[in-house]
Image (cartoon, helix red, strand yellow):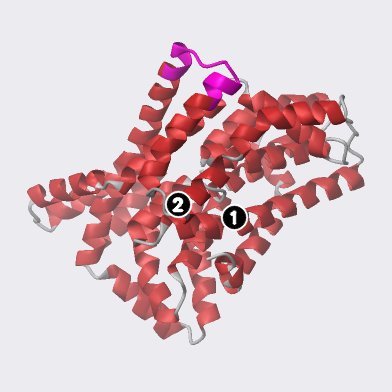
Amino acid sequence: MALTLAWLFPILLFLAVPVAHALLIAAGVALLIADRPLAVSVQRLYTPTQSFPMLAIPFFILAGNLMMSGRFGDYLIQFAKLLVGRLRGGLGQVSVVGSVMFGGVSGSAVADASALGNALIPMTKREGYPAGFAAAVNASSATISVLIPPSIPLILFGLVSNASILDLFIAGIIPGLMLAVGLLSVCWVSGTVRGFPLTPPAGGARAFVRNLGYALPALIMPVFVVMTLRLGIATPTEVSVMAVAYALFVAKAVYRDLTWRHILKCLIQTGIMTGAVMLVIMASSLVQWILTLERVPQALSDWLIGTFSQDWMVLLCMNVIMLVVGTFLDLPAAILLLGPLFISVAGSIGLDPIQLGVMMVVNLSIGLYTPPVGTTLFISSTIAQTSIGRVVLELGPFYLVSLAVLGLVSYLPAITNAFL
């Protein structure tokens, strides 16, 4: 069955079949060839949908949609401009700072790339920045969102590995901030060397305080999530429901732009996004069952340990595999497929599951802006109205920063374990 999956799934992806459907078709064909009862496979599809912690995903998505549906994005961008807009490469740095702030609300790189890109890329082009650079900054900085709590990919890894979602949230903060600092540095160096125009923001101390007041209710969202979990006040699922209530209150009482039309739109968007994620989860669960029956995780662990004599070499091989897979699969699907495979390998070399989870998210997020299936890359290039090739040429320094952060997270456990 595993061999059937190994050749049929890549063929379906090459034929542009959506990932979830490709997984289902490949798994179905493998089960038919092996003459396995289909009733069991239906149970395997249904079982992961009955997880109580899984409810955290749609509620966090809804909270993010509610926060971003109105004028919050405008306030956030204005605040980011007041913070870093006066520096060289300032508008690029606004995109990075905006991603850090949006990450604490959306938890989704795709939502970040779309929301910030539509607001910032046209503005950046008008100020004289190359379209490829504007798209490159947006595509790469959007991945910060998957490390800042509440991160949907970290929740998914927690579900497949039984690792603490709270610990994963806390462990992702420092790597997310490290990535942000690295990308800010790239923007500053590029702006200085290439002579990008300075765009000092209008206003002053009064404008800064005003925009901080508008941005603050959203900025404390990740703090609220982490502290509520850390103090044991609620479970991740309960916190996600509280986040929705908080988002409704802020949108209604602070921003005062919440209407029934906004709520309906957010509910529809949440339903669509949740449906897509759940379909991938169901299909991945069936594939994981097949791989477990074939003892593929154990075989992979034995091969890696037997082939490479040093733990650092095993880690390097794992990272290379994830980098390759991440360029072809979306982040949720890659986590759900590779997570169970690498958990046994991590146990064999003494790698902490929390560190593995953050390492996987940092690694696979690079695939979001890498051809041929880079989601944030395609979103950003479309908004910028420029070719993929020009954006990829601008992405070189951003790749180097991301790989440097990946190396530090992989080989320095203190980065992810500092506050655990």
Q: Quadrant of the N terminus?
A: bottom left
Instruction: Say whether residue 13 is left or right of residue 382.
Output: left
Task: State how far apart marks 1 and 2 are (Cα).
Answer: 15 Å
Q: Secondary structure at mark 2?
A: helix
In this picture, which residue range is highlighted in magenta? 250-263
Give the residue at x 35% y 61%. 161
Could you tell me residue 308's position as x and y percent? Answer: 47, 83
Q: Is residue 353 visible?
A: yes
Label 2 amino acid? Leu
Could you tell me residue 127's position as x and y percent? Answer: 84, 27
Residue 312: which quarter of the image?
Answer: bottom right
Give the residue at x 35% y 54%. 159
Could you tell me residue 340's position as x and y percent? Answer: 34, 63
Counting every numbered tag in the picture gives: 2
Q: Nearer the viewer, mark 1 or mark 2?
A: 2
Residue 163: which quarter of the image?
Answer: bottom left
* 380 or 350: nearer the viewer: 350
| Residue matched to label 1 | 173
Label 1 amino acid? Ile
Instruction: Say whether residue 200 is left or right of residue 56.
Output: right
| Residue matched to label 2 | 229
Name above or below for residue 112 compared with residue 119.
Answer: below
Instruction: Say whether residue 89 is left or right of residue 418.
Output: right
Give the residue at x 14% y 55%. 33
Sequence-earlier tag: 1 or 2: 1
Give the residue at x 47% y 48%. 228
Q: Secondary structure at mark 1?
A: helix
Chief SS of the magenta region: helix
